[in-house]
Amino acid sequence: MIELRTPAEIEAMRPAGRFVGSVLVAVKEATSVGTNLLELDEIAHKMIRDAGATSCYIDYHPSFGASPFGKVICTSINDAVLHGLPYDYAIQDGDIVSIDFAASVDGWVSDSAISYVVGNADPEDLRIIESTEKALEAGIAQAVSGNAIGDIAAAIGDVAASYGYGVNMDFGGHGVGREMHGDPHVPNDGRPGRGYRLREGLVIAIEPWFMRGTDEIFTDDDGWTLRSADGSRGAHTEHTVAITADGPVILTDRTGL
C-alpha cells in the first residue's frame, strides 16, 4: 500500500534523516586503510544507542536474507555491491567502500547510502561512484508531483547508459515511512511517464547502484552480501526524498554535517 504523508509528518521525519546522514558522515570519517568493518559497525551502533534511535537492520530478515542481518550497517567492498554483511576485514588501500544505513527516530525511518574510495583511487572506481551520484541527482530532479515513477527510473537509467553501465533490476528504491521498505518500488531504469503518478506527500528512497562490468549478481556464502557476477567493482548512492509542493526535499541531505 502506498502511503502519503502530511506536511507535518514530513517535518517529523527530518530528525531521522539528519541522524542517518550524520552516521554516514561519521563512518566515512572513521574509515582509513586498516580500519576493520566491524569497527565501522560499532561506531554506527554506538551512535544509535546514544541517540535513542532504532536500527532497521539488526533484526531484518526478508525472504532474500539467509538469517536476521545481525549488524546495523551494510558494508559492501569492491565487487560486493549491495547488502554487505560486516565481517572481520581490514580495509585495504584502493578499496571501494559502500555504506548503506537506515534507522528509525521517533517512529520515522530514513535510509541512505554512500560510496567512496579509501587511499589511492583507480580512476575507473571514481568514475562509477560519480555515475551513481549523477544518477541520484537526475532521479531526484524528476521526483516532483505529476511525474511518474518511470520518469525517475528513466533518468537514472539514462545516466547509467551514458557511462556505459548496465542496470540490474532486481533491487532498487522504495517507499519509506514507519517501515524501511514500502511501496512503491522505484527501479533504476524504465520508461518516462510509466507507473505510479507521483503525488505530494510521497516519501521514497532513490538508490542507483551500478557495476563496472556486468548487470548480474550472486549471493555470497554469508547469505546476504550481493556480489557482481564477474568480480567487477560497483558503487551505491541513496537518499530518502519527500515529494512536496515546493519540489523534492532530501531528508537525508548531508550538506553541512
Image (cartoon, helix red, strand yellow):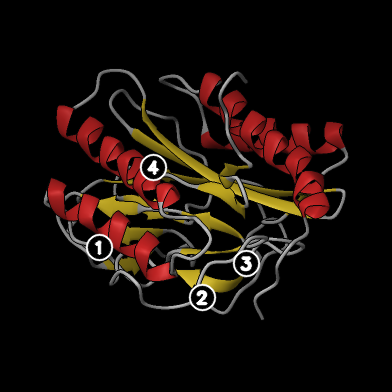
Whether the residues at callouts 2 and 4 have beta carbons within 8 Å, the answer is no
Q: Earlier in the sequence, mark 1 or mark 3?
A: 1
Q: Which residue is mark 2?
A: 64
Q: Which residue is mark 1?
A: 167
Q: Amino acid at mark 3?
A: His
Q: Position of residue 212 (x, y in %)?
A: 18, 49
Q: Nearer the viewer, residue 75 or 183?
A: 183
Q: Position of residue 246 (x, y in %)?
A: 60, 45
Q: Against 78, is 148 above or below?
A: below
Whether the residues at callouts 3 and 4 have beta carbons within 8 Å, the answer is no
Q: Residue at x 24, y 67 (%)?
A: 216
Q: Nearer the viewer, mark 2 or mark 4?
A: 4
Query: Picture quarter containing residue 221?
Result: bottom left
Query: Picture quarter containing residue 175?
Result: bottom right
Q: Which residue is mark 4?
A: 137
Q: Residue at x 50, y 43 (%)?
A: 113
Q: Earlier in the sequence, mark 1 or mark 2?
A: 2
Q: Residue at x 29, y 49 (%)?
A: 79
Would you say 40 lies left or right of 230 here? right
> For the residue labelled by badge 1, is the local secondary structure a helix, a strand or a loop?
loop
Whether the residues at callouts 4 and 1 have beta carbons within 8 Å, the answer is no
Q: Earlier in the sequence, mark 2 or mark 4?
A: 2
Whether the residues at callouts 3 and 2 have beta carbons within 8 Å, the answer is no
